[in-house]
Amino acid sequence: MSKIESLYRDFLQNQESQSLKRELIPAFHPSSREIIVADKTYLNFSSNDYLGLSKHPLSVKRANEYAEKYGAGAGASRLVTGNLDLFKTIEDKIAHFKKKEAALVMVSGFQTNASVLPAVFDKKILRQDALVFSDKLNHASMHVGCNAAGVSQIRYRHNDMAHLAELLEKHKNDNAPKFILTESVFSMDGDIAPLDKIYELAKAYDCFTIIDEAHATGVLGENGSGLAHGADLVIGTFSKAFGAFGAYVACSKILKNYLVNKCSGLIYATALPPATLGSINAALDLVPAMDKERAYLQNMAQTVRNEIQNLHFDCGESMTQIVPLIIRSAKNTILVSDMLKENKIWASAIRPPTVPANGARIRFAFSAAHTQNDVDHLIENLKKLKTLHHNQGAIS
Ligand SMILES: Cc1ncc(COP(=O)(O)O)c(C=O)c1O
């Protein structure tokens, strides 16, 4: 082993000793509600396939049709030869869906935050350093984007509007362009940012708002169109409720044109493959009419939240299809995840740095594909957990 590799090995050993080592586990999804691992079938309560669209016949059919017609790959960046005519159709639909002037399809949600944010915060264009006020629990990809932009974020306590107001007030005489950056639905907590208050503060302190709707798009708001219609720039993905892959920004025409000229993730990346565009296009046709599934989904999450609270466990401020069972210790979270697995429930342990130190949890994510029996089975096992907790103090 080289000296350099031994440093990586030391890191892995250290992660393991703290119950933080991650593994890639081969899996198969026979449906949107199940997962097969090592020949065992589990109920899948960890997927972001919130509407079960990854297996929808129309999404799969259109993916196949587009692959047949256009081939397996786009061949180049959208600015070179990869801008298939399909993009315009899809972008028009997204702009309409998100009630914005324009939309731009991107390669993935992570890559969008990592490359759109540096373009938007570009110091040369803004002619000075941007001041970026960001929620402490923003997704890793937003930090990557801020770091790439070279901005040092001014971070406010999670969803704490008094703290945001205090920080804005402190910087009110600074002439720098100001941005507020948040998720609308937080990925690991399932709670919702107080968007009206954010817009109010943005107006009072002349800030540009950027909101990541990864976990709201398709699931919340009118026709599933999300919650952040008042934002200046909306970022979202097709990898979650849309059951596909890829991402988008929705914004003004000027900003779209600016990104086409400035965003590295668009300029230097091969366009999404046709099959993926097929699934996205199908989902854009399906999602607006899925109110029944959305209501079912939120009801199911509420039932489980009620149960978690009755058992005196902690599910934080969850209000959506994402319901955490906050355990705190990484080791105990793995114990709980393993116990659930023994009972055919796949619910992954989420550990730091994905969540803050001492914030390890099981993150339950529900899907409209789950049945009442699936939820009953989960609740039964949460009750069993209570007994385990009493006997071993597994959940602190
Ligand atoms: C808030 C948020 N933004 C962006 C992403 C990245 O999206 P994608 O998985 O499409 O790359 C995620 C994924 O988990 C997310 O939770």
Image: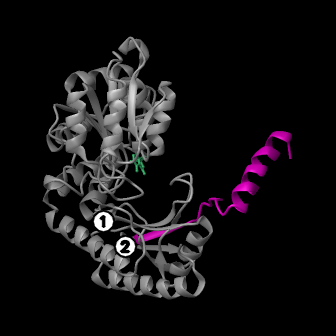
Residue 133: image location, x then y, percent: 38, 33
Magenta stretch: includes residue 8: yes
Crowding at mark 2 (Cα within 10 Å: few <14, some 14-19, many 20+): many
Considering only vertical position in the picture, is 345 above or below 261?
Answer: below
Q: Which residue is located at x 14 percent, y 63 percent?
A: 291
Which residue in the structure is indicated by mark 1? 52
Which residue in the structure is indicated by mark 2? 33
Image mark for residue 242: none
Among the 4 quarters of the image, the one containing residue 123: top left
Residue 247: image location, x then y, percent: 34, 42
Q: What amino acid does circle 1 point to? A: Gly
Considering only vertical position in the picture, is 302 above or below 191?
Answer: below
Task: Answer yes or no: is residue 336 visible.
Answer: yes
Magenta stretch: includes residue 381: no
Among the 4 quarters of the image, the one containing residue 311: bottom left
Q: Which residues are magenta?
A: 1-30
Instruction: Please report whichever mark, 1 or 2, sits nearer to the chain's N-terminal start.
Output: 2
Specify whether 374 is left or right of 226: right
Q: Return the residue nearer the eye: 82 or 44.
A: 44
Residue 53: image location, x then y, percent: 29, 62
Q: What amino acid does circle 2 point to? A: Arg
Q: Which residue is located at x 20 percent, y 27 percent?
A: 252
Considering only vertical position in the picture, is 126 above or below 271?
Answer: above
Q: Look at the numbered discs 1 and 2 and tell me whether their residues touch, using CB distance below 8 Å.
A: yes
Secondary structure of the residue carrying tag 1 is: loop
Q: Which residue is located at x 20 percent, y 29 percent?
A: 203
